[in-house]
Image (cartoon, grey):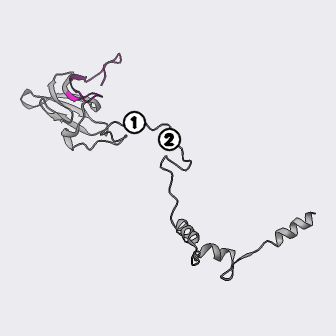
């Protein structure tokens, strides 16, 4: 019995033959495109389907399942995690991301705030400077005050006064 199975495996056809042409070897049949027969539409459709690359499912990934961590609803205008295209210089600074590194007396008694953004760029701010989402209202020896404008989650305009201290205490002064 084991010998019979071995003989059947050895006798498996090593070449394929077509009713319209001579036999081809298995590697040549795989690399050569199939020739459609006249009056046979299925072969023509199959050959065009083989030449087109398989598209991944729209729901995501090779498994065809949706990523459970992506939000189902995206707020209009949200870039889904992409950074904003902010203008260069002071006009691109956002009040919430600034850190006050120092405050100095400038010429004529003017106070100058030294601030740093998350990209570690340093800027010198004066009273009245306009930022991306606010303005510098007041600079004193230990803090800088900003007037921040923006919108809440419902699109309602919101204005607030925000003071950032030079040396925030560990008890809750946010930087």
Mark 2 crowdedness (10 Å alpha carbons): few <14, some 14-19, many ≥20: few
Assess whether residue 160 is covered by the magenta stretch: yes
| Element carrying mark 2 | loop
Instruction: Find residue 75 and report its image quarter.
Output: top left
Residue 102's disc number? none
Apparent side of residue 105 relative to residue 72 in the rendered image (left or right): left
Assess whether residue 128 is covered by the magenta stretch: no
> Residue extending furthest right?
1
Instruction: Find residue 111 and report its image quarter.
Output: top left
The reply to whether callout 2 and callout 1 are in contact (CB within 8 Å) is no
The residue shown at (57%, 67%) is: 46
Check the picture and name the quadrant holding the C terminus. top left
Looking at the image, residue 78 lies above or below residue 135: below
Q: Report the magenta residues as a range.
A: 148-175
**x, y percent for residue 48:** 52, 68
The residue shown at (87%, 70%) is: 7
> Residue extending furthest front?
39
Residue under pointer 1: 73
Apparent side of residue 31 relative to residue 161 in the rendered image (left or right): right
**x, y percent for residue 83:** 32, 42
Check the picture and name the quadrant holding the N terminus. bottom right
Residue under pointer 2: 67
């Amino acid at each position: 019995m084991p010998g019979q199975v071995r003989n059947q495996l050895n006798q498996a056809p090593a070449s394929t033959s077509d009713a319209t042409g001579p036999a081809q070897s298995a590697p040549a049949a795989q690399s050569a495109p199939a020739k459609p027969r006249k009056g046979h539409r299925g072969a023509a459709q199959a050959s065009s389907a083989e030449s087109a690359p398989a598209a991944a499912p729209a729901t995501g990934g090779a498994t065809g399942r949706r990523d459970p961590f992506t939000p189902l609803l995206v707020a209009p205008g949200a870039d889904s995690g992409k950074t904003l295209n902010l203008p260069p210089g002071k006009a691109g600074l956002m009040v919430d991301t600034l850190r006050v590194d120092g405050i100095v007396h400038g010429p004529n008694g003017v106070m100058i705030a030294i601030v740093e953004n998350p990209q570690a760029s340093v800027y010198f701010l004066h009273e009245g400077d306009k930022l991306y989402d606010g303005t510098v209202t007041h600079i004193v020896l230990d803090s800088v005050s900003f007037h921040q404008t923006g919108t809440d989650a419902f699109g309602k305009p919101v204005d607030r006064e925000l003071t950032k201290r030079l040396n925030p205490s560990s008890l809750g002064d946010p930087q």
